[in-house]
Structures are given as structure tokens and as C-alpha cells.
Image (spheres, rainbow, N blue to C red):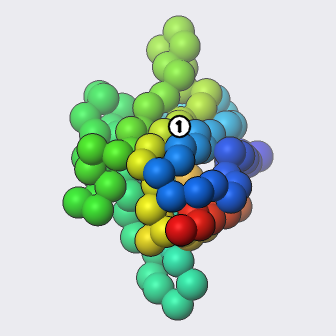
């Protein structure tokens, strides 16, 4: 059974950095894309960053130049997807979710809280 486990969230001051990790991808076959979403209180979940299996990445306008999505891609098997968060702002406060799209279905992690204080 596939289980995506996120870690790395926490409380940080504005301008600080965090690195989120999502582990457990090695059990998923035929991955098409890996993404990070976020959901702030009272708002809908929205895409933050997405990277395809071919390495093409795209970002929400609000995080371009500050966040970077990457994978470990060891021996052509992806085990972990990361999201590097730099120059954090209070409006980045949200629960961040890992998402993996395979040929057959998509998977979600349980979420990790990121709180940015001003």
C-alpha cells in the first residue's frame, strides 16, 4: 500500500526558509508528475509547484523565484520529492500537500503545516 509521508514543515519568521520532503514514491509505478499543493484556512487547495517525470517544472505565480521543486531520482527511481521554500512570507502560511500522479491514479500525502510569522 502506497503511503506518502511529508515532513519539514514548521514555524519560521518571514524571510526564512524551509525544505519540505515527501517520501514513499518508490512504490508508485509509472509516475507522470509530482506536485505540491497548499491550503490556507478558509481557502481552496491550490497548486504550488509541479514537476513531470521528464523534469519539466512549473510554479504558481505567487511562488516563482522563491520555491523550487526537485526529486532525488536515484538510479531512475524517484523516492522523494522536495519543495525548497525561500524568502517566506506570512501569506505562504498553509498546510502543504504532496501529490503524485501515476498512469492509474493519484496519491496524496497527509499534509504538513507551514506557518510564517511576520
Name the outermost residue toward the top.
Answer: 75
Q: Taking 79 as reference, is 115 above or below it?
A: below
- Asked whether the viewer can see residue 18, the reply is yes
Residue drawn where x is 54% and y is 13% of the image: 74
Decide if residue 21 is on the left or right side of residue 68. Answer: right
Residue drawn where x is 44% and y is 32% of the image: 70
- Asked whether the viewer can see residue 111, the reply is no
Decide if residue 86 is on the left or right side of residue 82. Answer: left
Percent across and percent down for residue 87 are 42, 49
Of residue 60 and residue 13, the one placed in the foreground of this image is 13
Q: Taking 42 as reference, is 53 above or below it?
A: above
Name the outermost residue toward the front.
Answer: 118
Name the outermost residue toward the right.
Answer: 1
Percent across and percent down for residue 71 are 48, 28
SS type, badge 1: strand
Percent across and percent down for residue 109 are 65, 56
Callout 1 environment at 10 Å: few (<14), some (14 to 19), or many (20+)? many
Residue position for label 1: 82
Residue drawn where x is 39% and y is 45% of the image: 67
Q: What is the count of numbered marks?
A: 1
Q: Taking 28 as reference, is 72 above or below it?
A: above
Residue drawn where x is 47% and y is 85% of the image: 43
Of residue 118 and residue 85, the one placed in the foreground of this image is 118
Of residue 110 and residue 63, the one placed in the foreground of this image is 63
Image quadrant where residue 54 sits: top left
Percent across and percent down for residue 23 are 67, 37
Amino acid at each position: 500500500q502506497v503511503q506518502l509521508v511529508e515532513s519539514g514543515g514548521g514555524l519560521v519568521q518571514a524571510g526564512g526558509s524551509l525544505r519540505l520532503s515527501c517520501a514513499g514514491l518508490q512504490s508508485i509505478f509509472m509516475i507522470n508528475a509530482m506536485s505540491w499543493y497548499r491550503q490556507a484556512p478558509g481557502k481552496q487547495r491550490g497548486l504550488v509547484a509541479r514537476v513531470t517525470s521528464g523534469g519539466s517544472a512549473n510554479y504558481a505565480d505567487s511562488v516563482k523565484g522563491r520555491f523550487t521543486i526537485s526529486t532525488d531520482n536515484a538510479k531512475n527511481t524517484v523516492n522523494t520529492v522536495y519543495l525548497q521554500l525561500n524568502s517566506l512570507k506570512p501569506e505562504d502560511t498553509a498546510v502543504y500537500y504532496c501529490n503524485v500522479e501515476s498512469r492509474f491514479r493519484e496519491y496524496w500525502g497527509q499534509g504538513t503545516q507551514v506557518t510564517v510569522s511576520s
